[in-house]
Image (cartoon, helix red, strand yellow):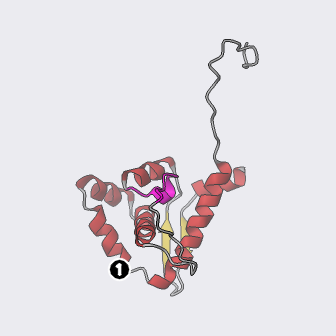
Amino acid sequence: MEDQLESITEGPQEITLTDGRTITIRPFTLGAISLCKKLGLTMFTGEAEDTGDDADDGGGALDDSMVQQLQTFFWMQSTPVPELLKSVRDGSWELEVEEFGLFLPVHEMETLMSEVNRISAMAAAVSVDVEPQGSGTDNSDVPGN
């Protein structure tokens, strides 16, 4: 588990596209999760909404929302932090994402999805569910009692 945590928190990671170009992304951090929430990237926050439409039509096709979220995620993780924060604060991030997407060929979606799946699998492997302490009056089994 420690190796998986290091893999998603140490960085940067380089993703090599089929044309030889690389996208360098920062580690997936608590700040990245916070920005994912702010930018509505439900694929990355565990808050994905069920729209009733199947994202996968059986042929592996991604719906428009998934494509937009992938594009936004890779823009967010590869843009220098000062530029990223400025565009989020001033509301220009959607235009920045649109411009970024103009240079991502459609055939690279498989490469990008592979990286998302890698990040997701590692994040899930190192996640911890914290259960609230019982509200019962008998706390004899609680450490320290």
Vertical placement of residue 82 versus 72, above or below: above
Q: Which is nearer the eye, 46 or 9?
A: 46
- Amino acid found under the numbered disc labelled 1: Leu
User: Who's the residue at 28% across and 59% down the image?
Assistant: 87
Tell whether position 55 is magenta. no
Q: Identify the magenta region.
A: 40-50
Q: Which is nearer the eye, 68 or 17?
A: 68
Tell whether position 42 is magenta. yes
User: Who's the residue at 39% across and 64% down the image?
Assistant: 79
Q: Residue furthest bottom?
A: 19
Q: Position of residue 43 (x, y in %)?
A: 49, 59
Point out the image quarter for the C terminus: top right
Q: Position of residue 75 (x, y in %)?
A: 40, 67
* Residue, disc 1: 102
Q: Position of residue 29 (x, y in %)?
A: 52, 51
In terms of secondary structure, where does tag 1 sit?
Answer: loop
Left/right of residue 3 with respect to residue 64 in the rendered view: right
- The answer to whether any part of residue 6 appears in the image is no
Q: Which is nearer the eye, 135 or 54?
A: 54
User: Who's the residue at 71% across and 13% down the image?
Assistant: 138
